[in-house]
C-alpha cells in the first residue's frame, strides 16, 4: 500500500531539515547529495575554465578536462538513483514532483559542466593560435576584454553557486536571487559581444574572435542552466511549473507571498 501524499511544504521542510518522513528518505537524501556534489564541482570547473581563458593558463584548462569525467560519473549515479527510487517506491503526487525536479536539476548541472569543457577547449585553442603571446593591442585577450570576461564569469558562476545553495534546502529566496541576477548576466554577455564586434576587435584575428565569442556564450549558458535549476526549486517548494512565467511578475509574486 502506497504512502498517502503529504503537503509540499511539509515535504520540503523535511528535506531541508534532514528529517524525512517518507519511507525512501535515505534514497532521496542520497540523490540530492550526489547532485549537490556535482554542483560544487561544476562551480569549481567554471572558475578554473575562466582562469584558463582570461589568464591564458593552460594548466587550468587541462585540469578542467581531466576532472570532467568525475562529473559525468556522478551524473550517471544520479540517473541510476532516480530510476531506483521510481522502480522501488513508485512515488506519487508531491514525492514524484521532487524526484522529477531532481532529475531535471541533475541534467542542468551536467550540461553546465559541459559548458566549462567548451570554455577550456577555447582557451587551449587561443593558446595554440598564439604560441608566443605578446603584450600590446594584439594581446589575447586584451586587458579591457579580460575585465569584461571576468565580470561575465562572476555573474555566471555566482548564479550557479546560488542555485546549488537553493537546491540544498529548496530555498525559494535563493532561487529568486538567481532570477534577479539574470539581467546582469545578459548585460555582461552583451558587453563582451559588443567589444568583440568592434572593427577589428582591437586587432584580433577572426579565429580568435570566434574562440572568445564561443567561450562567452558558454559562460552565459552556465547562467541559463542556473536559472533552470532555480525554476525546479520553485517547482518543488511551491508546486507550480514557472518555466514560462514572466520573470518580473514571478519575482514580485513570490517576494510578497501572493498566490499564483
Image (cartoon, rainbow, N blue to C red):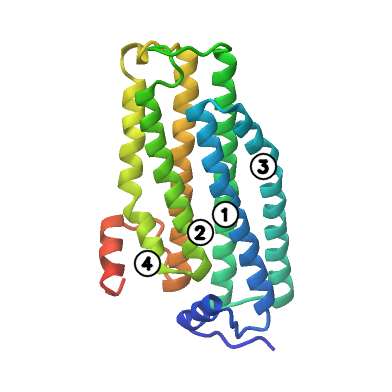
Callout 2 crowding tier (Cα within 10 Å): few <14, some 14–19, many ≥20:
many
Q: Position of residue 55 (x, y in %)?
A: 50, 28
User: Residue visible at 31% across and 69% down?
Assistant: 254
Q: The C terminus is located in which quarter?
A: bottom left
Q: The N terminus is located in which quarter?
A: bottom right
Disc on the earlier residue, 3 or 2: 3
Whole-number angstrom distance, CA of label 1 to CA of label 3? 12 Å
Whole-number angstrom distance, CA of label 3 to CA of label 2? 18 Å
The secondary element bearing badge 3 is classed as: helix
Which residue carries the number 2 mark? 164
From the viewer's perspective, is 192 left or right of 75? left
Which residue carries the number 1 mark? 39
Whole-number angstrom distance, CA of label 4 to CA of label 1? 19 Å
Which residue carries the number 3 mark? 68
Whole-number angstrom distance, CA of label 3 to CA of label 4? 30 Å
User: Residue visible at 56% across and 51% down?
Assistant: 109
Query: Are discs 3 and 2 less than 8 Å apart at CB?
Result: no
Q: State the image quarter where residue 197 is shown.
A: top left
Amino acid at each position: 500500500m502506497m504512502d498517502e501524499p503529504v503537503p509540499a511544504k511539509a515535504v520540503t521542510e523535511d528535506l531541508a531539515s534532514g528529517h524525512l518522513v517518507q519511507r525512501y528518505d535515505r534514497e532521496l537524501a542520497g540523490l540530492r547529495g550526489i547532485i549537490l556534489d556535482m554542483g560544487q564541482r561544476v562551480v569549481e570547473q567554471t572558475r578554473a575554465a575562466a582562469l584558463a581563458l582570461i589568464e591564458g593558463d593552460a594548466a587550468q584548462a587541462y585540469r578542467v578536462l581531466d576532472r570532467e569525467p568525475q562529473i559525468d560519473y556522478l551524473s550517471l549515479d544520479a540517473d541510476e538513483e532516480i530510476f531506483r527510487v521510481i522502480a522501488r517506491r513508485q512515488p506519487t503526487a508531491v514525492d514524484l514532483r521532487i524526484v522529477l525536479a531532481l532529475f531535471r536539476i541533475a541534467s542542468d548541472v551536467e550540461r553546465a559542466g559541459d559548458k566549462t569543457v567548451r570554455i577550456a577547449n577555447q582557451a587551449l585553442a587561443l593558446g595554440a593560435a598564439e604560441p608566443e603571446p605578446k603584450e600590446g593591442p594584439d594581446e589575447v585577450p586584451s586587458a579591457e576584454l579580460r575585465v569584461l570576461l571576468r565580470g561575465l564569469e562572476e555573474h555566471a558562476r555566482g548564479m550557479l553557486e546560488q542555485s546549488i545553495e537553493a537546491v540544498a534546502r529548496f530555498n525559494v529566496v535563493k532561487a529568486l536571487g538567481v532570477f534577479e541576477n539574470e539581467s546582469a548576466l545578459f548585460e555582461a554577455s552583451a558587453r563582451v559581444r559588443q567589444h568583440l564586434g568592434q572593427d577589428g576587435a582591437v586587432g584580433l584575428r577572426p579565429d580568435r574572435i570566434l574562440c572568445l565569442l564561443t567561450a562567452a556564450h558558454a559562460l552565459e549558458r552556465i547562467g541559463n542552466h542556473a536559472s533552470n535549476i532555480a525554476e525546479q526549486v520553485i517547482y518543488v517548494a511551491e508546486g507550480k511549473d514557472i518555466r514560462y512565467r514572466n520573470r518580473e511578475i514571478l519575482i514580485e509574486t513570490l517576494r510578497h507571498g501572493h498566490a499564483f
